[in-house]
Image (spheres, rainbow, N blue to C red):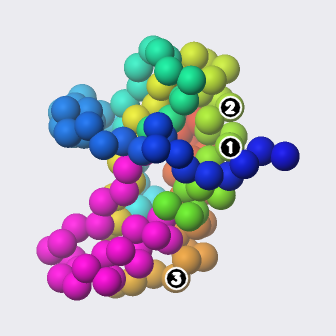
């Protein structure tokens, strides 16, 4: 049975890579989330790297931002298996940033539905 964890290698932390996302990346939007992503030839054993952003201007309290980030990470963690497999088959490294766009806190179910739609759209575009 596959383990559904998000390892350190799957987190996108490089400031250069994040800047590259916004300069060269493509965008997708499915309310309340949007995604910026780029693809590169696969050089590591992990086919996807991702990070999450919840803008400070929409949520002044860190508690609210952290709640939304936890919900987004959980939705991604539970539903990213097909995306990982697809990227491995195509021999592609997918780097993506999920950005929360709404100004109100959405329920987990709404975030998960949006995440699933985004992941399906990414599979079609790669």
**Residue bearing the label numbered 1:** 81
**In this rendering, is residue 118 above or below 89?**
below
Secondary structure beneath dot 1 equals helix
Q: Residue at x 68, y 31 (%)?
A: 85
Q: Residue at x 29, y 67 (%)?
A: 54
Secondary structure beneath dot 2 equals helix
Position of residue 113 in the picture relative to residue 19 (left or right): right
> Would you say the residues marked 2 and 1 are in contact, meaning their CB atoms lie under 8 Å apart?
yes
**Residue bearing the label numbered 3:** 107
Q: CA distance from mark 3 to mark 2?
A: 28 Å
State which quadrant residue 110 falls in. bottom right
Q: Residue furthest left?
A: 57
**Residue bearing the label numbered 2:** 85
> Would you say the residues marked 1 and 3 are in contact, meaning their CB atoms lie under 8 Å apart?
no
Q: Nearer the viewer, mark 3 or mark 2?
A: 2
Q: Residue at x 15, y 74 (%)?
A: 57
Q: Which residues are magenta?
A: 50-72
Indicate whether residue 61 is drawn in magenta. yes
């Amino acid at each position: 049975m596959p383990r559904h964890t998000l390892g350190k290698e799957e987190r996108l932390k490089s400031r250069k890579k994040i800047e590259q996302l916004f300069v060269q990346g493509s965008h997708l939007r499915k309310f309340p989330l949007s995604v910026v992503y780029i693809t590169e030839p696969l050089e590591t054993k992990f086919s996807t790297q991702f990070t999450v952003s919840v803008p400070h201007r929409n949520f002044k309290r860190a508690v609210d931002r952290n709640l939304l980030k936890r919900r987004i990470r959980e939705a991604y963690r539970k539903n990213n298996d097909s995306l990982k497999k697809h990227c491995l088959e195509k021999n592609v490294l997918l780097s993506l940033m999920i950005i929360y766009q709404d100004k109100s806190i959405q329920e987990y179910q709404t975030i998960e539905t949006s995440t699933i739609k985004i992941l399906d759209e990414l599979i079609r575009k790669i």
